[in-house]
Amino acid sequence: MAVDPVLCSAADSLLVVIDIQPRLAEAMPEEESKSMLDNTAMLLQAAGQLDIPALATEQYPKGLGTTSPELLGLLPQGATPLPKTGFSCFCAEGFETAIKNTRRSQIIIAGQETHVCVLQTVFDFLLQGYQVFVVEDAVCSRDPEHKIYALERMRQAGAVVTCGESVLFEWLRDANHPKFKSLAQLIR
């Protein structure tokens, strides 16, 4: 019996950007950090053009600073990153309400660190019955092995591990989509 694969749907997706702050990103391997920033920016731009809501969090902004400026400007109008000190995004005041208000069932995850804040947030989403897609080229950890093990743990728990380009083309589904040409340029 064939099982339909789970694909991202623009109508059902919510993009969650977890703690992408410069002071934290400086501790990441340079190539991993650049990939995370570039792919998160691509996803935010695509989400903006496709009317997909996006939320962001900041881990202890008093000590780690605010969201990276290049991403802050890509968040939807009026979207202010939610500060937190707990590792799961569900610890941020207003986060759970904001998620529920979107009425979206698929959560697309980007952020850092994969084995701490990303992992704990993903597990909380899974516990509540959401379909979770972790964008492997839009997450990172200080130690690349920690990222590998965290991705495997999330996969075993039921999250889909994917890449930014896959998410983009799943949101579009067809080269005849009115936004195809402008969004395809984001990956070039």
Image (cartoon, rainbow, N blue to C red):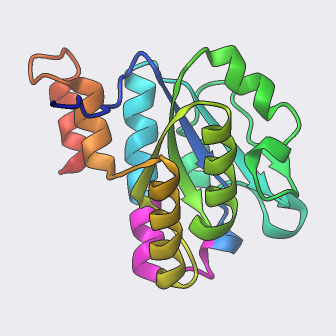
Q: Residue at x 68, y 72 (%)?
A: 24
Q: Is residue 146 left or right of residue 11?
A: right
Q: Is residue 153 left or right of residue 61?
A: left
- Pick the residue in front: 72 or 124: 124
Q: Is residue 76 above or below residue 32?
A: above
Query: Can you name the residue that lies furthest to the left here?
Result: 175
Q: Residue at x 60, y 63 (%)?
A: 112
Q: Quadrant of the N terminus?
A: top left
Position in image of residue 57 (x %, y %): 72, 47
Q: Is residue 135 above or below residue 175?
A: below
Number of numbered discs overlaid on the protein picture: 0
Evaluate whether residue 29 shows in this view: no
Position in image of residue 178 (x %, y %): 19, 14
Is residue 35 found inside the magenta-colored segment of the image?
yes
Write down the quadrant of residue 103 in the picture.
top right
Query: Can you name the residue that lies furthest to the front here?
Result: 1
Q: Residue at x 43, y 30 (%)?
A: 47
Evaluate whether residue 106 shows in this view: yes
- Pick the residue in front: 115 or 166: 115
Is residue 171 found inside the magenta-colored segment of the image?
no
Q: Is residue 173 left or right of residue 79?
A: left
Write down the quadrant of residue 50 in the picture.
top left
Magenta span:
25-36
**Secondary structure mostly taken by the magenta-highlighted segment of the chain:** helix
Position in image of residue 31 (x %, y %): 39, 78
Position in image of residue 97 (x %, y %): 79, 23
